Amino acid sequence: MKYTFDYLVYIGRFQPFHLAHMQTIKIALQQSANVILALGSAQDERNTKNPFLASEREQMILSNFSKDDQKRIHFVHVIDVYNDVKWVGLVKSLVAAIVKPTDKAGLIGHFKDDSSYYLQLFPEWQLVELDSLKDAISATPLREAYYRGEIKRIEFPLGTIEFLEKFQQTILYQELKDKFLKHDLSNL
């Protein structure tokens, strides 16, 4: 099959991985031989905004794809550096470790809100903008519901549901849930 790109880069935190994320990756796999998922907030400490480690997110994401598609999905772990110039340099260097100079690379995503400005920071990568996802699912309310004990099953693929159910049985989940609920109650 002839693809438009050798690699499409998809940047996100995927905390947790939901159906709009999956739809984006499926579109990327139709247009590109490979997809690189740049997992943001990949440092090793957990918090209520970033409850899952990068390795856990890899497992969660891959569990939703066929073995053949899994071989085409690559990951880079991007830690938070809180400086756009350094962050762009970090993303580019991580991607360059996978992509050869002769490969055609692009960036896939959609401008959902002000936080999506980063899509404009990579002018050397052709942008595949997904207008159809403008009203897409947001992970924040899904994460908040999760801390209240609810998994919004219609918003997640099966592999994510299974991961979330298993994680709910851990002490880590209980600690994060307690932190979230304590913070939530203090904001009343």
Image: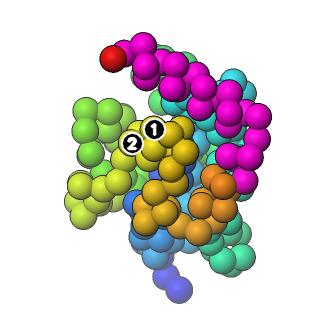
Q: How does the figure colour the protein chain or chains?
A: rainbow
Tag 1: amino acid: Glu
As drawn, is 129 to the left or to the right of 100? Answer: left
Q: Nearer the viewer, residue 47 or 114?
A: 47
Circle 1 SS class: helix
Q: What numbered label is drawn on residue 144?
A: 1
> Is residue 59 at all visible to an observer of this figure?
yes
In three-dimensional space, the C-alpha distance between marks 1 and 2, rounded to whole angstroms, equals 5 Å
Circle 2 SS class: helix
Read off the residue under disc 2.
141
| Quarter of the figure with residue 33 | bottom right
Where does the image place residue 70, in percent across and percent down from the top left? 68, 69
Q: Nearer the viewer, residue 163 or 145?
A: 145
**Which residue is at a point 63% across and 65% down the rendered structure image?**
159
* Label 1–label 2 contact, CB within 8 A: yes
Region rendered in magenta = 166-187
